[in-house]
Image (spheres, grey):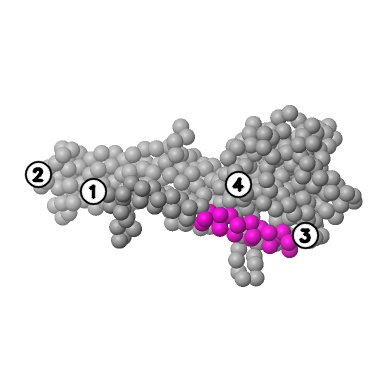
Amino acid sequence: MIGTMVWISRICCRKYGNFVDNLRLYVRGGSGGMGVPRLGGHGGDGGDVWLVSRKGVTLRQIKNRHPDKRFTGGVGADSSVQALKGEKGKDCEVFVPPGISVTTDEGKVIAVLNALGDRVCVAKGGRGGSLHSGFLPSKGQIRQIRLDLKLIADMGLVGFPNAGKSTLLTALSHAQTRIASYPFTTVRPEIGMVMYDDHKQVSVADLPGLIEGAHMNKGLGHKFLKHVERIRQLLIVVDVCGFQLADSTPLRSAFQTLHLLIRELRLYNKELLRKHVVLIINKMDLPDADEKLHEFLHQLENHHDFSHLLPDDATPEHFLKFQHIVPVSASTGVGIPLLKRLLRTSLEEQDAMATENQREDKLQELRRLQSTSVKPRMDGSFLE
């Protein structure tokens, strides 16, 4: 069995290697052009290096097309008799996917490109030679930067291996995900679109299965968990019959599995548990599923009475509240139409709550300003 698990781990690493979610680049602004002292000519500035968010681009494509991962702005033109002001060097634009964090090697965030068309200058070109520099140009800025991709989706499927996440995504969105009867089927994130009759779309990400200790980067823990950060809502998927990774590991009940998953999320980043969470209880087509579901729901309703079933570090201070709890069978389609409706409802509830919170914040700000005798202008700004 150990040999089998090692083989599966090698397959995971090899397959995940096809999906690139971080990249290190060398960027350098172009050098400025020479000035002409006797004519007072000004050399052209060097070209800048820009990152631009564009649809359909992947970090894998950047890596393949630019193996050296070096990007340089154009050199500014020298001043001359024909053109006293030298022409600016050509800017270098590097197209990247949305959802990119740009950081230095030390981890300092330079920019975050979330929306299509977002852009940031990562290396300034040098100044052209002029009177102030003795007509000598300066070199462009040099940087080593890191691009870190975090998927952006409305909802993300989170669960231990073999919980049926890939089958569920296929049932919801008809995404062509890889499905098999062994753990670690999903070894790279997949995104499917749930379509509705009124053409509304909800994006759902299938994140590769976690294992216990993922928060400590066991398996490929951090590679997977980081993608949860920009997802609006969590869809925690639990096998109604529980989970057992291997013969040498204990069989966990659905109740235990759920809280071990929550522990991994909490220990990686407790802010993740502030998101809205929908609990999906999968594989309701299995024998004794109804009986196990009844037991699971009873344990959730009376969780304090069953906390002794959990490992010490998996017992939460506050038990998580779920927006919805939905039993389904992804393989047979039972419960899928209801789940699709609830996914949309849950997002609409979140949007309505956010709108109400913004309204309350504005009202409180108005009350505060009125109490300090601050009058609003006609353009919506405020005047003392």
* Position above or below: 41 against 138: below
Q: Position of residue 204 (x, y in %)?
A: 64, 55
Q: Secondary structure at mark 2?
A: loop
Nearer to the camera, 83 or 53: 53
Residue placed under numbered mark 2 in the picture = 38
Disc 2 vs disc 3: which is toward the camera?
3
The amino acid type, in three-letter code, at marker 1 is: Gly
Horizontally, residue 368 falls left or right of residue 60, namely left
Residue placed under numbered mark 3 in the picture = 335
Disc 4 from disc 3: Cα separation? 23 Å
- Count all numbered tags in the image, as a single digit: 4
Residue 203 figure quarter: bottom right
**Magenta includes 339?**
yes
Q: Name the residue furthest top.
A: 312
Q: How many C-alpha atoms fall within 10 Å of the one at disc 1: few (<14), some, or many (≥20)?
A: many
Disc 1 vs disc 2: which is toward the camera?
1
Segment tinted magenta in the rendering: 335-356
Q: Position of residue 141 (x, y in %)?
A: 33, 39
The amino acid type, in three-letter code, at marker 2 is: Arg
Instruction: Verify CB contact (< 8 Å) between mark 1 and mark 2.
Output: no
Disc 1 vs disc 3: which is toward the camera?
3
**Magenta includes 80?**
no
Residue placed under numbered mark 1 in the picture = 44
Which mark sits nearer the N-terminus, 2 or 3? 2
Which mark sits nearer the N-terminus, 1 or 3? 1
Q: Secondary structure at mark 1?
A: loop
Q: Which mark is residue 275?
A: 4
